[in-house]
Structure formats: structure tokens, C-alpha cells
């Protein structure tokens, strides 16, 4: 099964799939995933690109992550790493991802 398929059918939802991938990939000391889809419910893309399995929501997320893996990395390198880790979710219905990635002590 491809990553894209796994993202679309994760039994606990998109946020849980994102959490599992970010924890596995970055071993964060802090991780918060906030579903902000409700703020965008009336937007055109909500009708065109509904969330997981045609359900409403799970399209807009904010990720706050603190990990030693980000030490010495620029903001763009951190964002690219997170986007790569969540590529399946971004390709399977996640419309927007806000990222706040820091190293410990920042």
C-alpha cells in the first residue's frame, strides 16, 4: 500500500498519521498538531477537496514541533524536512500546513 493510500485511510485520522510520522522522523521533545479546518469550512476548496474519505475537516493543520533534529538547520530546511515527511498527507487532502519548527532552547 502506498504512503498516499495509508494517509487517506489511517483509522485514527490524518492528524494521527501526521503525529506518527513526525514522531518517527524527528523524535520531538514537543509536538502539537492542531486541526484548523473549521476556520476554512466555507472556502471553495472545502467543497472541491474534502477531507479524509470525503469527510469534512482534516484539511488545514498547524504543527508546532521542537526537536534536536533541527539544531543547525535553517527555517527552510526544517520546513522542507517536515513537508517531505508529510508528503502523503499533503497529496491526499491536506490543503494547508502551518509549521513552527524549533530546536530545543530556541
Image (tube, grey):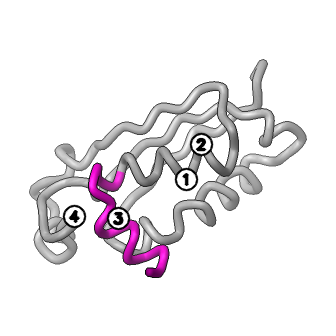
Spatial CA span between label 2 and label 1: 6 Å
Are there few (<14), some (14-19), or many (20+) residues within 10 Å of tag 1?
Answer: some
Which mark lies nearer to you, 1 or 4? 1
Q: How many marks?
A: 4
Q: Are marks 2 and 1 in contact (CB under 8 Å)?
A: yes
Which mark lies nearer to you, 2 or 4? 2
Residue in view at x 76 percent, y 55 percent? 77
Q: Secondary structure at mark 1?
A: helix
Spatial CA span between label 2 and label 4: 22 Å
Disc number placed over residue 51 in the picture, else none:
4
Q: Is residue 81 magenta?
A: no
Instruction: Name the residue that disc number 2 marks.
Output: 23
In magenta, the rendered stretch is: 1-14
Q: Secondary structure at mark 2?
A: helix
Instruction: Name the residue that disc number 1 marks.
Output: 21
Q: Quadrant of residue 31?
A: top right
Which mark lies nearer to you, 3 or 4? 4
Spatial CA span between label 2 and label 3: 21 Å
Q: In the rendered image of this protein, does residue 97 appear above or below residue 27?
A: below
Instruction: Tell me the quadrant of the picture where the C terminus can be found.
Output: top right
Q: In the rendered image of this protein, does residue 38 appear above or below residue 103?
A: below
Residue in view at x 17 percent, y 45 percent? 38
Outermost residue toward the top in this view: 105
Instruction: Name the residue that disc number 3 marks.
Output: 95
Residue in view at x 78 percent, y 41 percent? 70
Residue in view at x 55 percent, y 53 percent? 21
Outermost residue toward the bottom in this view: 1
Amino acid at each position: 500500500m502506498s504512503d498516499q493510500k495509508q494517509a487517506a485511510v489511517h483509522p485514527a485520522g490524518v492528524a494521527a498519521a501526521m503525529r506518527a510520522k513526525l514522531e518517527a522522523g524527528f523524535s520531538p521533545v514537543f509536538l502539537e498538531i492542531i486541526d484548523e479546518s473549521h476556520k476554512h469550512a466555507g472556502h471553495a476548496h472545502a467543497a472541491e477537496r474534502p477531507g479524509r474519505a470525503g469527510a469534512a475537516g482534516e484539511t488545514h493543520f498547524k504543527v508546532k514541533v521542537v526537536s534536536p533534529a533541527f539544531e543547525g538547520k535553517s527555517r527552510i530546511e526544517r520546513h522542507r524536512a517536515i513537508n517531505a515527511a508529510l508528503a502523503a498527507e499533503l497529496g491526499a487532502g491536506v490543503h494547508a500546513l502551518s509549521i513552527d519548527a524549533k530546536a530545543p532552547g530556541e
